Image: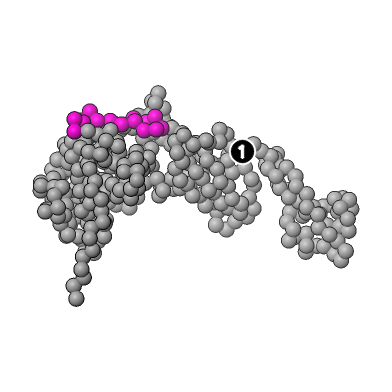
Amino acid sequence: MARVPLPDPRPDIDPAQVGASVGITAATGADYRFTDAYGVTYTGTAAHLALSALARCDLTSGIYPDQPAVAVGIRAAARTLIDWITSPHTDPEHAAEFAALSPLRVCELVVYLCLHGDADVLCQVGPASLRHYTDHLLHDPVPNAEHPLPRLVDGPHRSLHGPGARPGTRLQVTATAGDEADEVAVPMRIHASEDVHWRFTAAIPVPADRLNELLLNPDYLTGGYLSDNRELIDDYLACVAGDTSEGLHVIGRLADPTAVVLDTAPARPTRVNLFFIGPDRDTALETAPFGSRGLAERFAEAGDRIFSVGIEVDPDTVRALP
C-alpha cells in the first residue's frame, strides 16, 4: 500500500525578512559587508558574504524568534549551498554565475533549499550529481515549488571536499578586525576534564581571519580549536591534575559576545587535601601526610583515625622529589 504523504508542516518563510536579519535588502549590491559583535568586518564577494552571514548562528538567531527551527533550517541550507558552490567539482561557470548573484537572490535560494530541500538527499549530493543542482538553482525559475530540486545523488556517496577542508577558507570573504588587530577575544564556555574538572567562561584569542570559519560551525569547531591550541587555556587550568591515561578532554561552546569573562587565569595557589593518621588529631599531624584517603586507609592501624587537612599549594613553587 502506498504511503499517504503527510501535510507539509514547514512555515512560509519570507526571503526579505531573512535578508533583513543580516542587513540585506532589495537594494543591497556588490558593496554589501557586515560587522559582527566581535568587531570584525567582512568584505568580499557579495554572494559569498551573504551565504556566510546566513550560515552563522550569531547573526541569524533573530530570524523568526518565535520559530527557532526556521533559523536552524536557514543555517543548514546556507552551509549546504556553501559546500555546493565552493566545491572543486563545481562547474567554473556555475561558480562564477553564483558569485555574481545579488545578496537578496542568495537569500531566496537559501530559503528555497530550506523549504523544498530534502536533507537526506542533499547530504548525498556528490561530484557526479552536483552539476544538476547548481544548474537548477542558477537557470531554472526557482524558488518555485513547480520546479522541484533534482533527486539525483551519487551512489555510493562521494564527498564534495577533501578531508580536513574548512568551509570558511573556501569562501571569497576577507575579515578585518578593529584597529587591524591579528586576533579578537571570543567568549567561550569551556568544560575541560582530566582527573579534575573545570568550568568557566573566558575570552579566547582567535585570529581574525579564522573567526568566520569558527562561527560557521561553532559547536563542532570550538572544541577542536581549543584542543589544537591548548596553550590558550593552560593558565586557566590552575589545579595540578594527577595521572590520567586519556589526557585532557575539552568541550567548548561559544558564549554570548557580551558574557562576563575571566580577565585573567584563576589566582594561584591551589587548594588540595592531605590526610593524616593517628589516634588523635594532634598526634596525627606530627606524622607524614598521605595524598589520598585511600592511601591513608592502607596504612592505618587499629585505633587510628584519619584526619583531613586542606592546604594551599602554589604549583609554580612546587618541585619534584628526587
40 vs 1, nearest the viewer = 1
* Highlighted magenta segment, given as a residue range: 26-41
61 vs 195, nearest the viewer = 61
Q: Can residue 27 be found in the magenta stretch?
A: yes
Quadrant (top left, top right, bottom left, bottom right) of the N terminus: bottom left
Image height of 236 relative to 76, above or below? above
Q: Position of residue 215 (x, y in %)?
A: 37, 41
**What amino acid is found at the position of numbered circle 1 in the picture?**
Pro
Q: Position of residue 203 (x, y in %)?
A: 49, 36
- Furthest residue toward bottom: 1
230 vs 123, nearest the viewer = 123
| Residue 67 in sight here | yes
Determine the image quadrant of residue 291.
Answer: bottom right
The residue drawn where x is 41% and y is 32% is 38
Q: Disc 1 designates what residue?
A: 266
Q: Is residue 268 left or right of residue 186?
A: right
For the stretch drawn in magenta, the main secondary structure is: loop
The residue drawn where x is 17% and y is 59% is 151
Q: Position of residue 75 (x, y in %)?
A: 30, 46
Q: Is residue 65 left or right of residue 257?
A: left
Element assignment for label 1:
loop
Q: Can residue 30 be found in the magenta stretch?
A: yes
Determine the image quadrant of residue 107.
Answer: top left
- Furthest residue toward top: 179
The residue drawn where x is 45% and y is 46% is 253
| Residue 87 in sight here | no
Q: Would you call the spot at circle 1 few (<14 residues within 10 Å), some (14-19), or many (20 or more)?
A: few
Q: Is residue 278 left or right of residue 83?
A: right
The residue drawn where x is 14% and y is 55% is 148
